[in-house]
């Protein structure tokens, strides 16, 4: 028996709204804290939001911001507000 995924399906060509972006940001932040072998793939995130994996790829690129840790090392994160402003 195959497992059934209960995800909301968006109409084709529909943009991500602010709630979707905030949920994606939450998933991305949680993903960074997991070991690499347990992280969600972009396809998993896409299934969760009911969109194509390429949408997630573009969205993560669009909302990418650079931050610095206390040791001044730069790292990138996804910011829903930055992605919303660019849209």
Image (cartoon, rainbow, N blue to C red):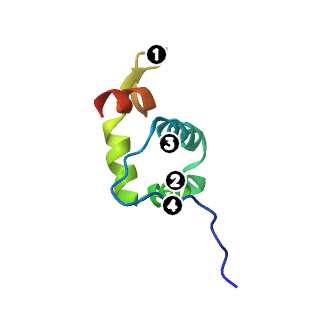
Front residue of 50/79: it is 50
Quick check: can you spot residue 83? Answer: yes
* Residue 85 % position (x, y): 33, 26
Q: CA distance from mark 2 to mark 3?
A: 7 Å
The residue that mark 4 highlights is: 9
Question: In screen coordinates, is 30 left or right of 62?
Answer: right
**Reading the chain from its start, which is encountered first: label 4 or label 2?**
4
Q: Residues within 10 Å of mark 2 (few under 14, many from 20)?
A: many
> Looking at the rendered structure, which numbered label has been put on residue 52?
none
Q: CA distance from mark 3 to mark 4?
A: 12 Å
Element at label 3:
helix
Q: Residue furthest right?
A: 1
* Residue 12 % position (x, y): 37, 60
The residue that mark 3 highlights is: 20
**Reading the chain from its start, which is encountered first: label 2 or label 1?**
2
Taking the spot 38% from the left edge, 42% from the top edge, the residue there is 60
């Amino acid at each position: 028996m195959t497992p059934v995924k209960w995800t909301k399906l968006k109409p084709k060509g529909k943009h991500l709204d602010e709630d979707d972006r905030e949920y994606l940001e939450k998933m991305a932040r949680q993903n960074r804290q997991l070991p690499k072998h347990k992280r969600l793939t972009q396809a998993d995130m896409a299934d969760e939001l009911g969109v194509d994996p390429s949408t997630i790829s573009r969205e993560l690129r669009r909302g990418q911001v650079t931050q610095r840790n206390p040791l001044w090392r730069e790292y990138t994160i996804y910011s829903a507000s930055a992605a919303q402003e660019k849209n």
